[in-house]
Amino acid sequence: MTDTTPPAMTPASATRSGHGPAGQAPGSISGLTATGGLATVELAWHSYRPPRGQLVDHYEVYVFDRAGQAKSLPGSTTLLGRTLYPHLTHRVGPEPRTRHYAVVAVVASGARTRPTRPVSAMNERSVAAGRAVAQVGDFDHKGLEFALSPGLSARYSATFPNGVDYRYGTSTPGRDWCYLHPGPGDSWAGRKEHTFALRFDLDAAPKSDLACALWLIDSHASAAGAAEVTLNGRPVHTLKFRGGATRGSVEGDATRPDSALKPSYYEFPLSAGLFTAGENVLRLRKTSGSWIAYDALGIFTRE
């Protein structure tokens, strides 16, 4: 999967590669930190202040598997992204992995600072790293595989008049699961609650608790609202969504360098006693607020 999400840049700075006229700006960036989280590594550093009144054009952030690789920068194979700001979010997959990072400042003349001393971080293990019992979509910070994505929400009511009813193993994301889950605040979807159902079969009830992972690529900025989660008709969790960027209704890829999307991630346990042999149904009912935009949803064993 592509696991980079550099922030947006202005057109002028985006056209510069950082490999301009030969020369080196004095010093290097200080204060680089990397903090691993669920599906992310958050990078931050101190703003670079070049001498003689020059301005910072942008920062280049590098990621690599071994800390010693920082000595060979710049290298296009390890360039994570460019940003105008002294921070960047690296969006990663469900599996925990240690990565090493370094940052270079590029000034307006094209001169570059020395790379920072590398820092390391490991992202948290997502429950989606376990074995899937049922899943819809890929945990990759994209929602382009879903029906009506990325900008056809106006067709939702005609395509899904009774909400979404998806059977794992038979249904397909591109036809049977809408990229956008509307809420009571959405006039284009009738200003009512909408329920998405994920059906799956089990040969036998599990002996151990399972877990649910819901990743979103975006949500409404000021009215993300909430959803009630039930399993086989029994309430299991109330999801209160964080505000996003209100762009997920027209964009589907949070890994694009110019993406303004604000993904969020929700994971919670599901008691083994809630499951049964045969058909099981997980339902998400949007009870308040406006829409959310899906990345992926799944139920997993804890491994």
Image (tube, rainbow, N blue to C red):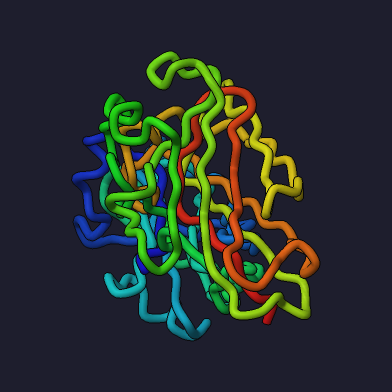
Specify whether 238 is left or right of 65.
Answer: right
Q: Quadrant of residue 159?
A: top left
Specify whether 143 is left or right of 232.
Answer: left
Specify whether 132 is left or right of 179.
Answer: right
Viewer-proximal residue among 111 and 139? 139
Residue drawn at point x = 73 percent, y = 41 percent: 238
Viewer-proximal residue among 26 and 18? 18
Q: Residue 11, image x and y in percent?
A: 23, 35
Quadrant of the image containing the N terminus: bottom left
Q: How many marks?
A: 0
Viewer-proximal residue among 272 and 63? 272
Q: Residue 113, image x and y in percent?
A: 41, 60
Q: Residue 85, image x and y in percent?
A: 47, 42
Residue drawn at point x = 56 percent, y = 59 percent: 40
Residue sitting farthest toward the front: 278
Viewer-proximal residue among 281 and 114? 281
- Using the image, determine if residue 186 lies above or below residue 37: above
Specify whether 146 is left or right of 238.
Answer: left
Residue drawn at point x = 43 percent, y = 33 percent: 162
- Using the image, determine if residue 249 lies above or below residue 230: above
Q: Residue 126, image x and y in percent?
A: 62, 67
Residue 25 in sight from this viewpoint: no
Residue drawn at point x = 64 percent, y = 60 percent: 212
Quadrant of the image containing the C terminus: bottom right
Residue 184 in sight from this viewpoint: yes
- Using the image, determine if residue 45 lies above or below residue 127: above
- Using the image, determine if residue 172 lies above or below residue 191: below
